[in-house]
């Protein structure tokens, strides 16, 4: 397979976006279709690069539709719900996370309930709040100690969720990568109030 020119792909996507005539293409769906057709018609890209460009642009479209909560919906073949995302189904993401509720626990009901609530409302496979067991973190090193908290660097084994596999409908992980950890004080006495006022802003 030939080398994929990432810079050229992004330049082609951006150029196609700047060519949108918003009077002619007056809906998000029409604008997305125009950009895709413009990418496919651009002969400076190889076929592999066009596939990569469309895949990359679909991710942007997913995000845009989900954030704006607008655009054409489609019936998901797996769960039969009307989803907004193009390259995955946000309801299938939520359903998968629900099936995993019994497979993890922080040991604190308030934390578990909060994370489960966030997961039930998850709309993007790469933006999911989850509990990370301590043994999934390695190479933990203190980066800095401030007045109210301590910051660490670490390696997160397997990393966070990245995308929904279209064949087995399971969330796939990004792979091992570096993360920043922040220590929260007084976790043993955590109450519902504590989460609403404190943790929500730190997640
Ligand atoms: Zn679905």
Image (tube, grey):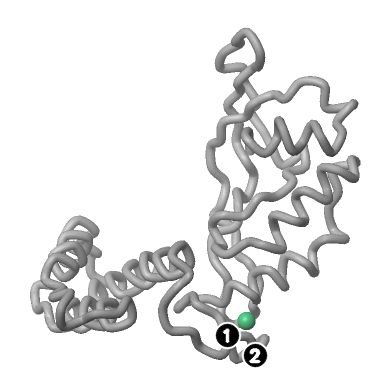
Q: Nearer the viewer, residue 119 or 143?
A: 119
The relative height of residue 14 versus residue 44 in the rendered view (above or below) is: above
- In the rendered image, residue 40, in percent from the top left (x then y), is placed at 19, 82
Q: Residue at x 86, y 43 (%)?
A: 110
Label 2: how many Cα within 10 Å (few below 14, some 14–19, many 20+): few
Say whether residue 54 is left or right of residue 146: left
- In which quarter of the view is residue 77 placed? bottom right
Mark 2 vs 1: CB contact within 8 A: no
Are there few (<14), some (14-19), or many (20+) residues within 10 Å of tag 1?
some
Residue 159: x and y in percent read 60, 48
Q: Position of residue 101 (x, y in %)?
A: 82, 61
- At numbered mark 1, what does the secondary structure look like: helix, strand or loop? strand
Q: In the visual, does 34 lie left or right of 170? A: left
Q: Residue at x 37, y 72 (%)?
A: 58
Q: Which residue corresponds to the image point at 61% horizontal and 23% vertical from the top-left?
A: 152
Q: Which residue is mark 2?
A: 80
Name the residue located 63 percent from the left edge and 67 percent from the top edge: 171
Split into 4 quadrants, where in the image is the C terminus? top right
Which residue is tagged 1?
Answer: 82
Q: Tell me residue 196's x, y (percent).
A: 74, 38
Mark 1 CB lies closer than 8 A to ligand 1:
no
Mark 2 residue element: loop
Ligand 1: give its quadrant.
bottom right
Which of discs 2 and 1 lies nearer the camera? The answer is 1
Determine whether 85 is above or below 142 in the image.
Answer: below
Q: Is residue 114 left or right of residue 125?
A: right
Above or below, 163 relative to 203: below
User: Which mark, by number, is residue 99?
Assistant: none
In space, the residues marked 2 and 1 are separated at their CA atoms by 7 Å
Q: Is mark 2 within 8 Å of ligand 1?
A: yes
């Amino acid at each position: 397979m030939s080398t994929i020119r990432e810079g050229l792909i992004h330049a082609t996507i951006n150029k196609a976006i700047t060519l949108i005539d918003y009077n002619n293409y007056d809906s998000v769906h029409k604008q997305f279709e125009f950009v895709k057709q413009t990418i496919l018609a651009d002969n400076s890209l190889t076929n592999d690069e066009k596939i990569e460009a469309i895949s990359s642009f679909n991710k942007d479209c997913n995000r845009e539709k989900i954030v704006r909560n607008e655009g054409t919906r489609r019936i998901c073949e797996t769960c039969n719900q009307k989803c907004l995302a193009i390259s995955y189904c946000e309801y299938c993401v939520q359903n998968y996370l629900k099936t995993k509720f019994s497979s993890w626990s922080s040991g604190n009901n308030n934390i578990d309930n909060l994370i489960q609530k966030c997961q039930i409302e998850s709309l993007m496979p790469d933006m999911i709040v989850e509990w990370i067991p301590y043994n999934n973190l390695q190479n933990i090193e203190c980066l800095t100690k401030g007045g109210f908290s301590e910051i660490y660097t670490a390696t997160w084994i397997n990393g966070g969720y990245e995308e929904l596999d279209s064949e087995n409908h399971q969330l796939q992980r990004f792979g091992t990568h570096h993360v920043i950890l922040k220590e929260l004080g007084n976790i043993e006495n955590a109450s519902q109030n504590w989460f609403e006022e404190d943790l929500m802003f730190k997640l």
